[in-house]
């Protein structure tokens, strides 16, 4: 199967799956998409129901990655989703109350958040892609992080063959828990460096290194190629299709869904990656009815889905669901491609770059409306959803999941559509323990580390293993540098 850029109107530059994963972004600035979407036949789906998560993942990914063997994919998926790492299961489906509402818990992995679902497997796909494309250099992955993505990337790339990773974070811009998580990171091929400055300084520094031909040249001579762990990489999107199919299998196995019945999916959305994966599953034939796109106070997507106009020119809000505080949802470009084609996509992206806004043609809006509906939850509604899920259903929800729970309820109330609903649960409540504690205890936690223990005591639930005993772990990385010294830190790490 070939991959093309979303902006490649005449399909002039096909690449293999391995090349798309190695390259990340297409040369014209577009995102890679497969030339066709495979169909999930009834027989294929039925057979999947008997498989465990790793086999389900390998079989679905094989449909898209025909330059990988099934054995390679199965072995990588078994390693990625091992029970030692996903101790609560890879993507368990948990009933919330008795109204056919289910939480698809995607956070039982090594960093207690859903990015693990993709970042545990993507580095393995990349490592193989290097070999498949005859690349003998080592991929150097540089990440600027405001907290969570950095940790998930570190866990994903640690000790992966032919890769090295350096993560930069703003020294005073992450929480105490996040800092501890990164400073105690294990793995021989990873390094973590704190920057004096804010997240923008770290990100600008990384972008500068990526754009510097002198650096590229020196890295190349030293046997390194620069690569990114960015969420627009096809290798990060593809593994996310799997858990929606897996959820259907679980609902079917449990007799909650019968032949010919559909289910709805509600996803707390930021960059539009997670919900777009659900859309692809739907287009491939998974019986999904509505896709409910859930946003927080930064509801640029809700407005887009309601009006057809995407407008990033607006105030930016810091919310208690920070991973959704996004005004440019990069993966939306792939939805435009699949509903409007390359020409319209390229035009919209140009307008977005120039004016920060665009409007899709009416027939594209109509096509999007057939699948999607947008809702949002403000801060008060988010907190209320946490309080309610716990009080009424004994379900402990994180802040991002709570946005989706609120939106799912708004949708049901407004439409009366009580079709079984799967809510993507994207983080452990302990990942955002302070705000979860506030919503349930109606009191302030002592600090963000203490909040873990206070939430555990309050709800009689366990702190997940990635977040327990943090303060007792050995700190391996304590360097703090000026942002202007980031390039030297790279050379220094690699001994160049
Ligand atoms: C990244 C993230 C999201 C948003 O997912 P997208 O794929 O960017 O839409 C939601 N919740 C959590 C906890 C996340 O880390």
Image (spheres, helix red, strand yellow):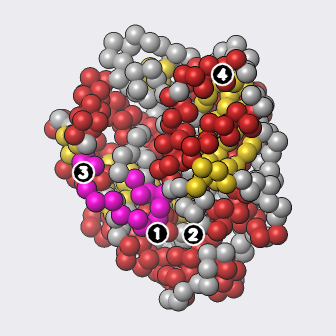
Label for residue 344? none
Residue occupied by mark 2:
432
Circles 2 and 4 in contact, beta carbons < 8 Å: no
Which label lies toward us, 1 or 4?
4
Residue at image location 51% in from the left, 53% down from the top: 199
The span from disc 1 to disc 4 (Cα, nearest Å) is 42 Å
Residue occupied by mark 3:
313
Q: Dot 1 surroundings within 10 Å: few (below 14), some, or many (20 or more)?
A: many
Residue 114 visible in image: no
Residue occupied by mark 1:
320
The span from disc 3 to disc 1 (Cα, nearest Å) is 22 Å
Circles 2 and 1 in contact, beta carbons < 8 Å: yes
User: In the picture, residue 359 is in which quadrant?
Assistant: top left
Q: Magenta part of the protein: which range? A: 310-326
**Count of number-bearing discs:** 4
Residue occupied by mark 4:
218
- Residue labelled 2 has its Cβ within 8 Å of some atom of ligand 1: no
The span from disc 4 to disc 3 (Cα, nearest Å) is 39 Å
- The earlier-in-sequence mark between 3 and 1 is 3
**Front in this rendered view, residue 338 or 258:** 338
């Amino acid at each position: 199967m070939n991959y093309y850029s979303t902006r490649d109107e005449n399909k002039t530059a096909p690449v293999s799956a391995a090349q798309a994963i190695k390259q990340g972004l297409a040369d014209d600035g577009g995102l890679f998409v497969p030339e066709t979407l495979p169909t999930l036949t009834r027989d294929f789906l039925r057979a999947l129901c008997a498989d465990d998560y790793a086999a389900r993942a390998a079989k679905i990914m094989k449909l898209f990655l025909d330059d990988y063997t099934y054995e390679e994919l199965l072995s990588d998926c078994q390693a990625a989703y091992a029970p030692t790492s996903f101790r609560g299961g890879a993507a368990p489906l948990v009933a919330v109350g008795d109204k056919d509402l289910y939480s698809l818990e995607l956070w039982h992995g090594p960093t207690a958040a859903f990015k693990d679902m993709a970042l545990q497997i993507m580095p393995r796909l990349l490592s193989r892609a290097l070999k498949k494309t005859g690349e003998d250099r080592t991929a150097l992955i540089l990440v600027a992080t405001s907290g969570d993505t950095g940790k998930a990337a570190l866990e994903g790339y640690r000790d992966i063959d032919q890769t090295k990773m350096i993560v930069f974070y703003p020294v005073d811009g992450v929480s105490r828990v996040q800092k501890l998580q990164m400073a105690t990171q294990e793995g021989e091929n990873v390094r973590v460096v704190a920057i004096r400055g804010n997240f923008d300084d770290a990100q600008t520094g990384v972008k500068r290194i990526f754009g510097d031909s002198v650096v590229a040249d020196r890295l190349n001579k030293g046997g390194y190629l620069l690569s990114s762990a960015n969420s627009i990489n096809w290798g990060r999107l593809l593994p996310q299709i799997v858990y929606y199919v897996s959820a259907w299998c679980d609902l079917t196995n449990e007799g909650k869904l019968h032949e010919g019945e559909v289910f709805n999916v509600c996803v707390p959305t930021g960059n539009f990656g997670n919900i777009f994966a659900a859309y692809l599953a739907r287009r491939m034939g998974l019986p999904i009815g509505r896709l409910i796109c859930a946003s927080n106070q930064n509801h640029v997507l809700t407005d887009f889905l309601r009006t057809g106009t995407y407008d990033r020119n607006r105030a930016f809000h810091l919310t208690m669901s920070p991973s959704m505080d996004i005004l440019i949802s990069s993966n939306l470009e792939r939805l435009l491609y699949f509903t409007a084609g390359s020409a319209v996509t390229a035009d919209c992206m140009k307008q977005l770059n120039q004016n920060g806004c665009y409007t899709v043609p009416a027939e594209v809006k109509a096509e999007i409306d057939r699948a999607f509906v947008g809702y949002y939850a403000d801060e008060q509604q988010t907190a209320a959803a946490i309080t309610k899920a716990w009080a009424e259903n004994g379900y402990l929800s994180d802040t991002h999941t709570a946005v989706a729970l609120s939106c799912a309820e708004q949708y049901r109330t407004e439409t009366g559509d009580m079709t079984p609903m799967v809510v993507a649960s994207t983080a452990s409540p302990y990942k955002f323990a302070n705000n979860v504690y506030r919503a349930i205890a109606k009191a302030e936690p002592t600090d963000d580390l203490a909040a873990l223990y206070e939430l555990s005591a309050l709800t009689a639930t366990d702190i997940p293993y990635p977040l327990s005993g943090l303060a007792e772990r050995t700190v391996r990385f304590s360097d703090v540098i000026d942002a202007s010294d980031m390039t030297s830190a790279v050379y220094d790490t690699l001994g160049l």
